[in-house]
């Protein structure tokens, strides 16, 4: 009787919601802890075009931290009596830090170049429509980065394969791209209205929203591009035909 009561307590809807809230709170604290030096740097920097490279350096620790958050939220336990979000976060951090940095460094460098170009666009002496093109390129780069972050956080691929898959899903999963674009707009709005610190305090919520929106992409990557997914598809094939 006692075991049944505990099982019902740990697996009910309210308990699952409480487990999610607890996981997000713990993950949020760990994100802040692992990105604190960069957050302090961003807070001290003026919002000036010349500080774009320094801002990019301050954002570098956010890559591994967000990757670990995605891993922890994705592998969270639904049972309120069996929660270990901190252990999952650090496991994801150790597993993904190198892979994330391999992609984050060139990605941030590219966005820095675009940001500096847009900030000094008037001095370039080029047609005005170039600004629209650069904004679209920056948006595509940001969406590519979101896809790459999710893929490298949940799967074990080489960096170049992650880059190819992230680009592939920009076009093959338009709903995912549109949803991620909305998240980027919301994140940009929070940063403009408040501060970067306010966005950092919502990082775990944005990670959960990114995971939720990326479910179709995650499912397709697992089924089509992993050994386990391909083997399961081959096993199910004969049964479908019969």
Image (cartoon, rainbow, N blue to C red):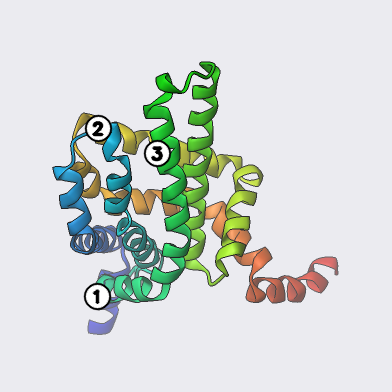
Q: Are marks 3 and 2 in contact (CB under 8 Å)?
A: no
Residue in the picture at 37% in, 72% down: 92
Residue 81: assigned label: 1
Q: Nearer the viewer, residue 71 or 59?
A: 59
Q: Are marks 1 and 2 in contact (CB under 8 Å)?
A: no
- Measure the C-alpha gap from mark 1 to mark 2: 48 Å
> Viewer-nearest of labels 3 and 1?
3
Residue 149: assigned label: none
- Measure the C-alpha gap from mark 3 to mark 2: 21 Å
Instruction: Name the image quarter holding the C terminus.
Output: bottom right
Relative to 136, does residue 59 appear above or below in the rendering?
below
- Element type where label 1 sits in the image: loop
Image location of residue 203, percent across then percent down: 28, 51
- Can residue 150 be seen by looking at this rendering? yes
N-term mark: 3 or 2: 2
Instruction: Name the image quarter holding the N terminus.
Output: bottom left
Give the residue furthest to the right: 242
- Is 37 left, or right, of 166 in this rendering? left
Quadrant of the rendered image containing residue 184: top left
Image location of residue 103, percent across then percent down: 48, 59
- The residue tagged 2 is 48
Q: Nearer the viewer, residue 23 or 61?
A: 61
- The residue tagged 3 is 184
N-term mark: 3 or 1: 1
Disc 2 packing (10 Å; few <14; some 14–19; many ≥20): few
């Amino acid at each position: 009787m006692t075991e049944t009561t505990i099982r019902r307590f740990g697996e009910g809807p309210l308990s699952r919601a409480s487990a999610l809230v607890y996981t997000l709170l713990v993950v949020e604290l760990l994100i802040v802890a692992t990105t604190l030096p960069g957050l302090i740097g961003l807070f001290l920097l003026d919002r000036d075009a010349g500080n774009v490279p320094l801002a990019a350096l301050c954002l570098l620790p956010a890559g591994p931290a967000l990757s670990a958050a995605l891993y922890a939220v994705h592998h969270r336990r639904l049972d309120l009596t069996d929660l270990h979000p901190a252990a999952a976060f650090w496991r994801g951090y150790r597993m993904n830090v190198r892979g994330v940095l391999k992609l984050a460094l060139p990605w941030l460098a590219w966005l820095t170049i675009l940001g500096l170009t847009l900030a000094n666009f008037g001095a370039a002496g080029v047609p005005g429509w170039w600004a629209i093109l650069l904004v679209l390129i920056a948006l595509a780069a940001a969406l590519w980065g979101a896809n790459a972050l999710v893929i490298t956080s949940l799967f074990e691929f080489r960096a170049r394969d992650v880059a190819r898959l992230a680009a592939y899903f920009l076009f093959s999963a338009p709903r995912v791209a549109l949803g991620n674009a909305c998240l980027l707009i919301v994140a940009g709005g929070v940063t403009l209205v408040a501060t970067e610190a306010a966005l950092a305090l919502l990082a775990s919520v944005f990670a959960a929203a990114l995971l939720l929106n990326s479910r179709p992409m995650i499912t397709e990557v697992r089924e089509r591009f992993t050994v386990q997914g391909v083997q399961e598809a081959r096993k199910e094939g004969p049964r479908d035909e019969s």
